[in-house]
Image (cartoon, rainbow, N blue to C red):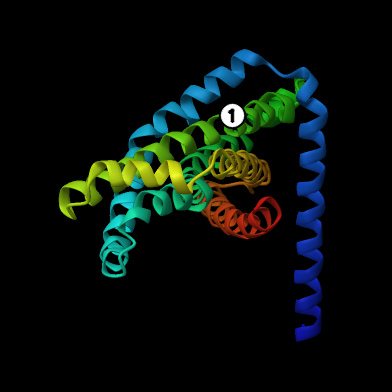
Amino acid sequence: MNWLEVVGRKVMDGFSQIGSATLLIGQTIKQLKMLNVWHVVQQMAHLGVDSLPIISLTLLFAGGVMTLQITDVLITYGAQSTVGGLMAVAMGRELGPILVGVVLAGRVGAAITAEIGTMKVTEQIDALRVMAVDPVGYLVVPRVVACMIMVPILAFYGIVIGIGGGYFVATVIKGLAPATYLDSIQLFSTISDFTLGLLKSSVFGAVIALVGAYKGMNTKMGAEAVGFSTTSSVVTSIILIFVLNYFLSSILY
């Protein structure tokens, strides 16, 4: 087998995966009309609420270290009155949505892939088809909707925690006046800095759920295949989040 044939096979495999993913997206949109609200609520509790501790720790220390790095520079140039505003804009536009998306890609995306992948290996998905239950409507749609709702909520929570971490570092460690930090948030940030960031988070939530479901439903037979699909799901989700973040930021801002 020469190199040209190898490249050709890789390209064809890539197009095949893109086609399969596109079909899954189409089937998910089609099955939205059959949405089971109770299943969505269950997934929201499982995928969203259980993620609060790790989101809290990640964003709290991210906000703290960001403030730690920029405060001395801004004080040196007499711009200490902009610390809070810069933190709010950075958290609302980029850091909050991105960090929450990456954390949930590792936790939620892996969980979705492992659950659906295990069902594929143990032939539970085939059993659903035998019982005339659409696997996409039963397994994929509730998870996609739950992620699109919960990821923006968690992102907003993370943004608040991150700004709070920055406030603690700026006022307690760096000695900045609390009023200066809070006033600069009102002065330099706008509502759109946060609402557009939450809109990006909703897109990231859909990506995490769809990638996790796609990788799970295309898992090959064997326990090792479940682990491979889970790893591939996390990596793919994180890459897509960073790529989409650039294009969404270019369009929205």
Q: Left of 127 or right of it: where is 229?
A: left
Q: Left of 153 or right of it: where is 220?
A: right
Q: Is residue 50 visible?
A: yes
Q: Amino acid at mark 1?
A: Ile
Image coordinates for residue 7, horizontal then vertical, percent: 77, 77
Instruction: Using the image as rendered, state which of residue 100 and residue 165 is in the foreground.
Output: 165
Position of 110 relative to 152 (above/below): below
Q: Residue furthest top?
A: 38
Q: Is residue 103 visible?
A: no
**Quadrant position of the N terminus in the picture:** bottom right
Q: Quadrant of residue 55?
A: top left
Label 1: which residue?
149
**Local crowd size for mark 1, using a 10 Å CA cut-off: few (<14), some (14–19), many (≥20):** some
What residue lies at 62% left-to-right and 46% top-to-bottom? Answer: 221
Q: Left of 72 or right of it: where is 236?
A: right
What residue lies at 16% left-to-right and 47% top-to-bottom? Answer: 172
Image coordinates for residue 251, horizontal then vertical, percent: 71, 54
Secondary structure under tag 1 reads: helix
Q: Left of 181 or right of it: where is 238?
A: right
What residue lies at 79% left-to-right and 26% top-to-bottom? Answer: 31
Position of 234 relative to 3 (above/below): above
Position of 36 relative to 67 (above/below): above
Image coordinates for residue 14, horizontal then vertical, percent: 76, 63
Instruction: Using the image as rendered, state which of residue 142 and residue 62 is in the foreground.
Output: 62
Image coordinates for residue 247, horizontal then vertical, percent: 68, 58
What residue lies at 59% left-to-right and 29% top-to-bottom? Answer: 149
